[in-house]
Image (spheres, grey):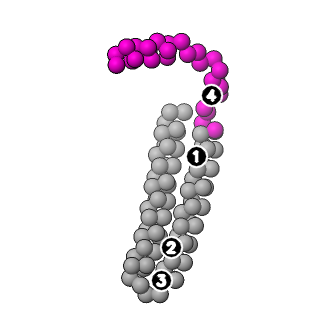
Amino acid sequence: MIENLQALYMLGQNITYDALPQTPANEALIKRILSLVFIATGAIAVMMVVIGGLKYASSQGDPQNISKAKNTILYAIVGLVVSIFSLTIVSFTIGRVA
């Protein structure tokens, strides 16, 4: 086992990283990526709220289906709130670092 780990370590020492792209991550690129992720998250959350509403409308009074529809809407809204908080935290951090 130790011999395998030592061989793996020696193999890792011979790797060169010259082929990796050397693109710096600047503030504008990170903000653009975050805005795209936030737009996608918002679109998915809206779609899930609509799907939950359609489930609720088509539940025909069945308590189990109503509960599933309400949970779909609730989880979509919670996911949207979490994504807003994460966007705020990352933007604040980038503002402090940059």
Task: State the extent of the magenta-drawn residues as a range.
Answer: 1-29
User: What is the secondary structure assignment of the residue under circle 4?
Assistant: loop
- Mark in front: 3 vs 4: 3
State the image coordinates of residue 43 (x, y, percent, origin top left).
60, 61
- Quarter of the image with the C terminus is top right
Q: Nearer the viewer, mark 2 or mark 1?
A: 2
Specify which label sits upstream in the sequence, 3 or 4: 4
Q: Is residue 25 left or right of residue 62?
A: right
Along the polypeptide, which appears first: circle 1 or circle 4?
4
Closer to the eye: label 2 or 4: 2
- Asked if the residue at tag 1 contacts the one at tag 2, i.e. Cβ–Cβ closer than 8 Å, the answer is no
Question: The residue tagged with tag 3: helix, strand or loop?
Answer: loop
Cβ atoms at labels 3 and 2 below 8 Å apart:
no
Check disc 4 and give the amino acid type: Pro
Q: Is residue 49 above or below residue 3?
A: below
The CA distance from mark 3 to mark 4 is: 52 Å
Q: Secondary structure at mark 2?
A: helix
- Identify residue type, mark 3: Ser
Q: Residues within 10 Å of mark 3 (few under 14, many from 20)?
A: some
- The residue wearing badge 3 is 59
Q: Amino acid at mark 2?
A: Gly
- Whether the residues at callouts 2 and 4 have beta carbons within 8 Å, the answer is no
> How many angstroms separate mark 3 from mark 2 (CA)?
10 Å
Residue 41 appearing in the image: yes
Q: Label 1 vs label 4: CA separation? A: 16 Å
Q: CA distance from mark 2 to mark 1?
A: 26 Å
The residue identified by callout 1 is: 34
The one of 77 and 62 positioned closer to us in this rendering: 62
Which residue corresponds to mark 4? Answer: 24
Query: Residue at label 2?
Result: 52
Image location (x, y in percent) of residue 92: 49, 43
